[in-house]
Each structure stands twice: as C-alpha cells, then as structure tokens.
C-alpha cells in the first residue's frame, strides 16, 4: 500500500497539490528567481542546478493560497551530485518530512508539535540577515504588497534630508525594500545622488541588497566613481562592497567595460578574486575575460586559492565549458600549467 509521500514525486507537485501558488528563488549566490518550469526540470534531473553554492542548491520557496494575504517562506538546502543535478534521495526525504509534519495541507498554521517536527528538518536553514531581508523585499514587491514600515525612513535618509550621519535608525530591511523598489517614486535619482555620500555603515547593507538588482546606467556610473575613489585610497572593504553591488548588472555595458579593465590593468587582491567568482561570475562567460581572471589566480603561486575557485566555478553550468577550454589554452603561462597539473594530482 503506498503512502501519500510515495505519490508526491517533487516539491513542485507538493505545492501544486496543496492548491498553492508559488515562486522559487536561488539564494546561494544572489537572490535570483527560478521559473516554476525551470524548477520542475531541475527536480526531474533534466537540468543541472544553475547557481550551485558549495555543491548545494540553496532555495527560498514562497507559497500562498489565493485567499491568503501573506506567503509562507521555506528556506531549503539540498545537495547536488557531481554533475550538478539535484540529489533525488535528499529531495524525497525533505518531502517525506514535510508530509509527516503537516499532511497534504502545507499552508495551514502549524501546531507547536508540527513546528517542532519542521524545525528538525535537516534541509531547513536560516539565511543571513541581508538575504532574508532581500527575499522579503522581493516577494512583497513581486506580489504588489506594501513595503515594510522600515522603507520610508530608509528612503528619507537616502534623500540626504537629515544629513548623512543620522544612519543609526536605518534598518537593513528598509534599505532592502528601497533597493527592490528602485523604479518607484524618484528612488533611482535619490540613490544616484546618495552613493558618493554614504558612510560605510549604510553602504555595506545597501550594496548587499543592490547585488540582486539589475541597476540603471546612472547608478552604475556612481558606483564605479565611488569604487575608483576607494581603490585609490586602498579601502578594500569599500572596494569589495561596491563590486558586490554590480553583481546583477554585469551585462550592463558600463559594468562590462569597467570589470574587464579592472582585471586587465590591476593586480587583484585575493578578496577581489573571490568576490568575482562568488558574485560577478557572469562576467567570466567572456573567453578573454575568463582567461585573464584565471591567470590572476596563479600570479602569486597560490595554488590553494586556484584550486578552491576552480572547483567553485567549474560547478556553474554557464562557466564550466569555457573554463575547461581555458585551462587547455596553448597560450597559458607556466604558472597556470603548473597549477592545473597540481589540481589534477589531488
């Protein structure tokens, strides 16, 4: 005799059978929407997971029923196999735990006992505060819900009306709401004027939100100007922060030129190399840029760094074929050839 969990073969099916509408977001690298159709193909092992993070898929699932005013949020961490495909056994185990705790109706408010069962779920995880804020902002903006109560104070601060040293009352959620509503009111203009003035205490959480947004050219221009200033004065923390802000804007022509020039004309700090792989990897889909980047990794004979970043990048389906082609390049330096040799001896 089959159980309910035997008949539900995917998370998509579980959500559909509960009569829920839902959205799936990757939150491992950036907060990035995965279409329901794409997620069904990922679950069916027809597609590798597009944004792997340390051999895992880190997913936010927002789901709601038509009569509901606010969605439920699950944060799920599922292992991937060596081909980047979702581990089917882990996914099935996750579904079985959910059904054991809640039954088929997953959109009811759980009892204390059910809550305790859900919290024991080994696939559940709690994202960093800035990621949680970004998911909340994106979901509320996507569903056309009002922003949080922290939004208007953040907007007012960023307008500069009360001076740039009054940041103590500005919250991470408010900054995130502002970033995800950049096209509303005159927020684009407010941000363009604010970037050059912001203290580090505000710039860091704001850029953590902006990394999930495709930014307009005028904002990118100001980020680059602030970057040049920080780069000249060796303020590495600000440099990293500003690079992160461009994470979803790498296809913007101004960003492309800036990042290509940065890699071609500078010695890059280890933290910069890491942030490029972790957040700005789409820029590496250009063969010449990828080759320049890989040569940077071995300039100081840091084979441990090369190995770690190679393993990270080769897992990204968009980068993998180009990277494998790059390491076979006849123009590779002796250092790169040596690093590749050591990599395959491990």
Image: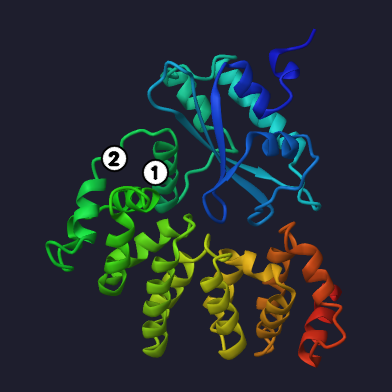
Where residue 316 sits, quadrant-wise, is: bottom right
Please give the name of the residue rendered at 74% of the width and 16% of the height, measured from the top-left corner. Answer: 7
Q: Quickly name the residue at label 2.
A: 148
189 on left or right of 5: left
| Nearest the eye: 88 or 234 | 234
Q: Give the x, y percent position of residue 74.
A: 51, 34
**Residue 276 quadrant:** bottom right
Q: Earlier in the sequence, mark 2 or mark 1?
A: 1
In x, y percent, where is residue 329?
A: 85, 81
Count of picture labels: 2
The residue identified by callout 1 is 137
Label 2 with label 1: CB-CB less than 8 Å: yes
Placement of 162 over or under 228, stated as above or below: above
User: The N terminus lies in which quarter of the figure?
Assistant: top right
Decide: is 12 above or below 141.
above
Nearer-the-camera pick, 311 or 171: 171
Element carrying mark 1: helix
Left or right of 56, for residue 169: left
């Amino acid at each position: 005799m089959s159980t309910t969990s035997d008949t539900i073969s995917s998370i998509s099916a579980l959500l559909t059978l509960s009569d829920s509408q839902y959205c799936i977001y990757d939150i491992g690298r950036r907060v990035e929407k995965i279409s329901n159709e794409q997620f069904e193909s990922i679950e069916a092992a027809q597609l590798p997971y597009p944004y792997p993070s340390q051999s895992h898929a880190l997913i936010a699932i927002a789901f709601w029923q038509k009569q509901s005013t606010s969605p439920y949020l699950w944060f799920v961490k599922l292992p991937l196999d060596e081909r980047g495909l979702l581990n089917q056994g882990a996914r099935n185990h996750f579904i079985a735990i959910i059904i054991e705790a809640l039954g088929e109706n997953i959109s009811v408010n759980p009892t204390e006992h059910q809550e305790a069962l859900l919290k024991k779920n080994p696939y559940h995880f709690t994202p960093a505060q800035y990621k949680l804020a970004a998911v909340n902002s994106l979901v509320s903006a996507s569903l056309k819900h009002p922003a949080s109560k922290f939004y208007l104070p953040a907007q007012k601060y960023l307008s500069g009306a009360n001076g740039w040293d009054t940041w103590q009352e500005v919250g991470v959620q408010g900054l995130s709401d502002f970033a995800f509503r950049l096209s509303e009111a005159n927020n684009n203009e407010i941000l363009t004027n604010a970037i050059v003035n912001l203290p580090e205490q505000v710039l860091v959480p704001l850029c953590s939100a902006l990394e999930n947004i495709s930014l307009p050219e005028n904002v990118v221009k100001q980020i680059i100007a602030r970057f040049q200033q920080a780069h000249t004065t060796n303020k590495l923390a600000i440099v990293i922060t500003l690079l992160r802000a461009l994470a979803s804007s790498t296809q913007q022509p101004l960003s492309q030129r800036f990042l290509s020039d940065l890699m071609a004309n500078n010695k890059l700090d280890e933290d910069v190399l890491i942030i490029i792989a972790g957040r700005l990897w789409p820029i590496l889909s250009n063969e010449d840029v990828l080759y320049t980047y890989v040569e940077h990794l071995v300039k100081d004979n840091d084979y441990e760094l090369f190995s770690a970043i190679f393993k990270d990048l080769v897992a990204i389906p968009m980068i993998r074929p180009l990277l494998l082609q790059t390491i076979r390049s006849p123009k590779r330096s002796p250092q790169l050839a040596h690093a590749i040799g050591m990599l395959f001896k491990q």
